[in-house]
Image (cartoon, rainbow, N blue to C red):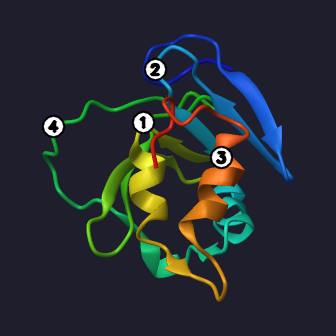
């Protein structure tokens, strides 16, 4: 599978039932359908349905990208509540997040009881270097 941003091959990284596809070149991440919710759960957060919405703006300055699974043009979606992050979404297959977008999203998710940022850093830090995926 190739990166929808730079077209380089994606590397599969697996941890705690989540199989992420990571671009070594641009540090983008592909989350198959349901994996973003599972990541939130594994890190003591919640991704509620109202945290994800379509971007209704006609002009947002970002070029369209093709889904790495089906090669169809992805829609733009807003994830988060306070400061939504504009991401690429294939309604059938998942989400593409550019470098840094995951950290911006996770900070906005509702914490479950007993969660803290250290859990998130530990979870992702063992998979990716902190420099590649800043939180």
Q: Which numbered mark, 4 or 1, is in the foreground of this view?
A: 1
Asked which secondary structure carries label 4, the reply is loop
| Labelled pair 2, 1 in contact (Cβ < 8 Å) | yes
Of pointers 1 and 3, the one earlier in the residue sequence: 1
| Among the two numbered marks 2 and 4 on one chain, the one whose residue lies closer to the N terminus | 2
Instruction: Give the camera-side residue of 89 and 101.
Output: 101
Question: Which of the marked residues, 2 or 3, is nearer the chain's N terminus?
Answer: 2
Question: Image point 41% across, 30% down: which residue?
Answer: 65
- Eyeballing the image, is 28 above or below 57? above
Q: Nearer the viewer, residue 69 or 10?
A: 10
Disc 4 residue crowd, few under 14, some 14–19, many 20+, Cα 10 Å: few
> Which numbered circle lies on residue 124?
3
Q: Which residue is mark 1?
A: 98
- Which picture quadrant has residue 81? bottom left
Please state which of the two labelled residues, at mark 2 or mark 4, is closer to the viewer.
2
Whole-number angstrom distance, CA of label 1 to CA of label 3 = 15 Å
Name the residue tied to disc 4.
61
For image coordinates 33% across by 56% down, the residue present is 85
First in sequence, mark 3 or 4: give its number: 4
Residue under numbered circle 2: 26
The answer to whether the residues at label 3 and label 4 have Cβ atoms under 8 Å apart is: no
In front: label 3 or label 4: 3
Where residue 110 appears, as percent x and y from the top left, is 50, 81
Q: How many marks?
A: 4
Nearer the camera: disc 2 or disc 3? 3
């Amino acid at each position: 599978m190739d990166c929808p941003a730079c077209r380089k091959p994606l590397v599969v990284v697996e941890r705690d039932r989540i199989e992420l596809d990571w671009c070594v070149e641009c540090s983008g991440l592909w989350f198959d359908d349901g994996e973003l919710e599972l990541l939130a759960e594994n890190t003591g957060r919640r991704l509620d349905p109202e945290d994800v919405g379509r971007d209704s703006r006609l002009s947002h300055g970002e070029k369209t990208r093709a889904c790495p699974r089906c090669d169809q043009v992805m829609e733009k979606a807003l994830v988060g509540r306070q400061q939504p992050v504009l991401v690429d979404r294939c309604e059938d297959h998942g989400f593409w997040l550019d470098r840094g977008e995951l950290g911006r999203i996770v900070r906005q998710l509702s914490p479950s009881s007993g969660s803290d940022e250290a859990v998130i850093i530990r979870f992702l830090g063992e998979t990716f270097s902190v420099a590649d995926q800043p939180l």
